[in-house]
Image: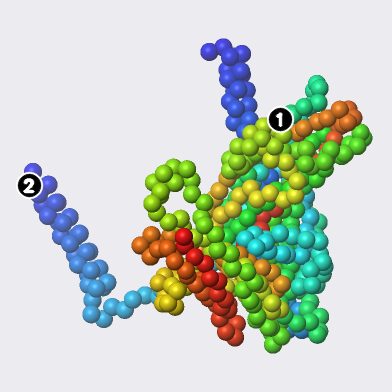
Amino acid sequence: MKKITIYLFLFSLILGTNIIPTDKLVYGDNARPGPTLQVTAIIEPCINITLSTDAIVFNCKGAPGVYNADQHVVVTVGSNCGNWTVKCSATPLKGDGGTIPSERMFMKTPDTPNTDKGAGGGFEPMSGEKVVLTGSSTERKETRLEFKLKTTWEDKAGTYTGQINYTYLATP
Amino acid sequence: MGNGKLRLLIFLSIFLITLPNLALSQISITVAPPLVETSIAGGGLRTFKLVVSNLGNKSVDIQGYTCDLKLNPDGTPFVLEAGISSYSCAKWIELTDDKFTLDPGSKKEIGAKIRVPRGVRGGKYAVILFESLSSASTKRGNVILGARLGTIIMVSIPWTLKREAKISQIRVEKAPISPGEGRQRKTLIQPINFIISFKNTGNVHIEANGSVVIKNDEGRIIDRIPLEAGTGTLLPEGVRDFQGSWSNPRKMVKGKYTAEVRINYRGRRQARAEKIFSIE
């Protein structure tokens, strides 16, 4: 027991002598701050657009009518600068049988009014450019878009291909 | 656990882990910076770098090209074919690489060069668009989805800038009231909306902000309404609609008023115009 007490005493003595000079070295009167390193972070402005899929398909099996796309599209936009707008536009669908005008493709966003323009409540014809999302800096926004296609007896059987573009521009 | 069951479990685990990647063919493109505003003297040249990144899980073919820029009266931008607008610099821009493929997670630095011809004046504008086309474009019967991201280019040619603008129209309208609000507001006066069309008659873009000062029939100022128009940017020949609403029931009493619109745009003087209206 006596030995342990002596060891403990010696240990605390050694520890104490180690701490005291170190403390003096750091906070002593003659101490000067060491060299400092200035850190600068430059975050460049940038914009990002994400589409949940790269293509949609309208499987029009049966009599002419209104057909849903095989899936909806989620558009997500991120920006760390200024105001921005995302617009959507469609090209006509072209195939061996002719052309289906873009007005017969319909799109529904969560914000469109629930009026029926030929393809059910909330679906608007894709003529011209439509604003689908707007926002301001440092936010990430997303919207869910649904699509429908209206076919008529004049549309010949066949495979038609087209394109829907989402254009992101900053608002200057 | 038997050998067969273990194999099935391993197969299912791998399938479930890779399922999201198999199912999603998403497009995710980033462009930096979204706006380049610069001043270049006639005959001068400026180069800058744009970075395009593919954050999606598939390779994408990217095409870069230039277009003209216009702004709607609500400030939303839209693109036109290059060289249509009289304030276009789309055809002065050269890209070091206008067609390339980006693998998932990769990025590419594109150099852009603007060469300003001698003798041109004012501000010139364009958009550099980067358009993605995925491999789905090869499949017939698909409606292909494409993303286009634009970098707006605004070039000012120093010592040739003319900042001029005018108020082209003041509309004063009663604000529409919803049915529920109408029942509560039976005895109250409807708010008044002001829509002011402001036209840039100079040769360079301007940033404007303003207010409407309401004066009573004795000419005394009784209220001031700030006008909203986002950034308030107008390109040359462009019109921007500024909006404000007067809905102060304590100050809105029946009578004749004058709305004096004051818009600042860093021009030689503030743009001012008046319109008389009444509350009945």
Residue closest to the eye, A92 or B202:
B202
Q: Please report whichever mark, 1 or 2, sits nearer to the chain's N-terminal start.
A: 2
Query: Most extreme residue toward the bottom, as rendered?
Result: B159
Chain ID at mark 1: A
Place of residue B279 in the rendered image (x, y in percent of width and height, measured from the top left)? 47, 62
Horizontal and vertical percent position of residue B21: 65, 35
Q: Residue at x 44, y 66 (%)?
A: B255
Badge 1: how crowded within 10 Å, few (<14), some, or many (20+)? some
Task: From the top left corner, tell me how far across and down residue B111 is, in percent.
Answer: 74, 67
B220 or B52: nearer the viewer: B220
Q: Secondary structure at mark 1?
A: strand
Query: Which residue is the site of mark 2?
Result: A2
Q: Are marks 1 and 2 in contact (CB under 8 Å)?
A: no
Work out how far the residue at label 1 is from the one at label 2, CA to CA, in angstroms. Answer: 90 Å
Q: Chain of mark 2?
A: A
Question: What amino acid does circle 2 point to?
Answer: Lys
Q: Secondary structure at mark 2?
A: helix
- Closest to the observer: B176 or B34? B176
Name which quarter of the figure residue B43 lies in: bottom right
Instruction: Check chain identity for marks 1 and 2: say if they share one.
Output: yes
Q: Residue furthest left?
A: A2
Q: How many marks?
A: 2
| Residue located 63% across and 37% down the image | A115
**Quadrant of the image containing the N terminus of chain A:** top left
Residue B247 in the image: x percent, y percent? 43, 60
Tell me: residue A91, above or below residue B141: below
* Residue B178 disc label: none
From the viewer's perspective, is the residue at label 1 or at label 2 nearer? Answer: 1
Give the residue number, with chain letter if any, for mark 1: A68
Between residues A110 and B184, which one lies in front from this camera angle? B184
Q: Visible in this render: residue B261? A: no
Which residue is at 69% across, 40% downward? A124
